């Protein structure tokens, strides 16, 4: 069975600092990887996805993530965060044999001035 | 273009009562999904409609939950009778394509509180 682990439930960071939100997955089949963001009082929004090809994926709002097959990781990074990046971030996988999205527990990014 | 809309945004009911959540997907999206997040836990898949047919309902917790999508447009998720453990946020999502290449667009969620 597939699973996703987000290692940090909360990540506090100061504005303009870099940030990395960690995500590890387990799967015995090919996976497709996603990061979603939920801003306060809004729905989930797709940040970026890895389906195939280049392991470094760039998304919206200056975020990027790197697929590392050997470490089964898909960490999300941003070199300089803004207050407006304060939100909850979800890593997710889609298994090629079930087609269902499987989410991690979520990481709350708190950007402080 | 309107996004995925869900109603109500918040519902508070007593144990044993019935609640019906509604989801209006993006027009033209044949695929409609329900997910649920119980407090402190991860978001979990409930079921997937393709048009009016249930493609996959393996995530439905038990027979107190009934999902419908009559006519292949909006969908309802009924919980009857509600139990305390049903409290959480119920998300609806829709997509034009199924599978990993089809981007899911999520609604804001319906928060259900069972007292």
Image (spheres, rainbow, N blue to C red):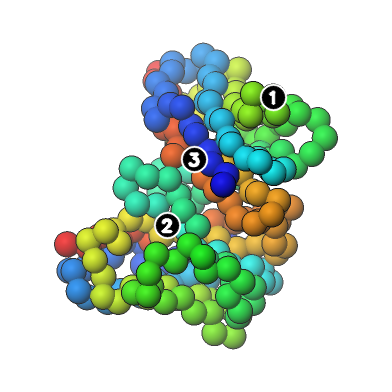
Q: Position of residue A49 (x, y in %)?
A: 68, 40
Do the residues at discs 2 and 1 belong to one chain?
no
Q: Which mark is residue A105?
A: none
User: Residue placed at 50% from the left, 57% from the top?
Assistant: B45
Chain designation of label 3: A
Comparing labels 2 and 1, the label whose residue is closer to the camera: 1
Q: In this figure, which residue is indicated by the disc labeled 1?
A: A70
User: Residue placed at 79% from the left, 39% from the top?
Assistant: A52
Element assignment for label 1:
loop
Q: In this figure, which residue is indicated by the disc labeled 2?
A: B36
Task: Say if residue A84 shows up in the picture.
Answer: no
Question: For residue A18, which quarter of the picture?
Answer: top right
Q: Position of residue B65 (x, y in %)?
A: 38, 73
Q: In this figure, which residue is indicated by the disc labeled 3?
A: A104
Label 3 neighbour load within 10 Å: few <14, some 14-19, many 20+? many
Residue at mark 2 to residue at mark 1: CA–CA distance:
31 Å
Chain designation of label 2: B
């Amino acid at each position: 069975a597939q699973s996703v682990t987000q290692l940090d439930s909360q990540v506090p960071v100061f504005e303009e600092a870099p940030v990395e939100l960690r995500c590890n997955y387990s799967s015995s089949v090919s996976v497709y990887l996603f990061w979603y963001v939920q801003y306060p009082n809004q729905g989930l929004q797709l940040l970026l996805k890895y389906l195939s090809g280049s392991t470094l994926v760039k998304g919206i709002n200056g975020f990027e993530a790197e697929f590392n097959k050997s470490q089964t990781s898909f960490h999300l990074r941003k070199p300089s965060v803004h207050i407006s990046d304060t939100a909850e971030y979800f890593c997710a996988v889609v298994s090629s044999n079930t087609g269902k999205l499987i989410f991690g527990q979520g990481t709350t990014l708190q950007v402080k001035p | 273009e309107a996004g995925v809309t869900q109603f109500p945004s918040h519902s508070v009911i007593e144990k044993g009562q019935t609640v019906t959540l509604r989801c209006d997907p993006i027009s033209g999206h044949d695929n409609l999904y329900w997910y649920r997040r119980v407090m402190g836990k991860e978001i979990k898949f409930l079921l997937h409609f393709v048009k009016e047919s249930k493609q996959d309902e393996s995530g439905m917790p038990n027979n107190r939950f009934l999902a419908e999508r009559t006519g292949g447009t909006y969908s309802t998720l009924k919980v009857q009778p509600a139990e305390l453990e049903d409290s959480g946020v119920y998300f609806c999502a829709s997509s034009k394509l199924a599978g990993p290449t089809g981007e899911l667009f999520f609604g804001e969620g319906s928060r259900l509180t069972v007292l």
